[in-house]
Amino acid sequence: MTTKNKTAERLIHASAAVNLKHHTHYLGYARPTQGRFNRSRLPNPIDVLHQLDIITEKANSKGYLKLRCPFHKDGNEKTPSLNLHKTTGHYRCHACGTKGTDILAFYMGITDKSFVEAAKDLGVWEVKHDR
């Protein structure tokens, strides 16, 4: 066999191996839910806190609510150390360092749900319908 044919044969086997790897990667996994996240439909953080039965203190002048951090391991925090913005949902605990950018991240952390499950619970996951 010539060198040119050996090189061509190696390329064919390498290509088949790559294709096999890509095609078998998704075998056994369920197809992801068709839909998309719509950030503009995120609920008011105060409503989500009421839904989760979390008690808050008054908001300060910058719009942050103080509450006891639900992410602490021991769960017996005496003074509120978590600040959550009442309109954006941005939060940060000054004791344990937990932080997030919106109320969806907060909800995911509390309920231990995936992104899609939490988005569906909060009503911000729009299902795409085939026509």
Image: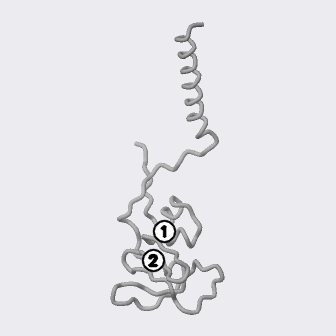
Q: Mark 2: which secondary structure?
A: strand
- Badge 1, how many Cα within 10 Å: few under 14, some, many 20+? some
When the figure is inspected, residue 35 is found, relative to residue 115, above or below; the finding is: above
Image spot of residue 87 (x, y percent):
36, 77
Q: Circle 1 is placed at which residue position? A: 105
* Image quadrant where one finds the C terminus: top left
What residue appears at the point 46 percent right and 87 percent down from the top-left corner?
66
* Image quadrant where one finds the N terminus: top right
What residue appears at the point 59 percent right and 30 percent down from the top-left corner?
20
Q: Is residue 86 left or right of residue 18?
A: left
Viewer-proximal residue among 50 and 71: 71
Q: Is residue 74 left or right of residue 10?
A: right
When the figure is inspected, residue 115 is found, relative to residue 88, above or below; the finding is: above
Image spot of residue 123 (x, y percent):
45, 65
Q: CA distance from mark 1 to mark 2?
A: 9 Å
- Badge 2, how many Cα within 10 Å: few under 14, some, many 20+? many
| Kind of residue at badge 1 | Ala
Q: Mark 1: which secondary structure?
A: helix
Q: Circle 2 is placed at which residue position? A: 91
Q: How is the image coloured?
A: one colour
| Kind of residue at badge 2 | Tyr
Q: Mark 2 or mark 1, which is nearer the start of the sequence?
A: 2
Q: Are marks 1 and 2 in contact (CB under 8 Å)?
A: yes
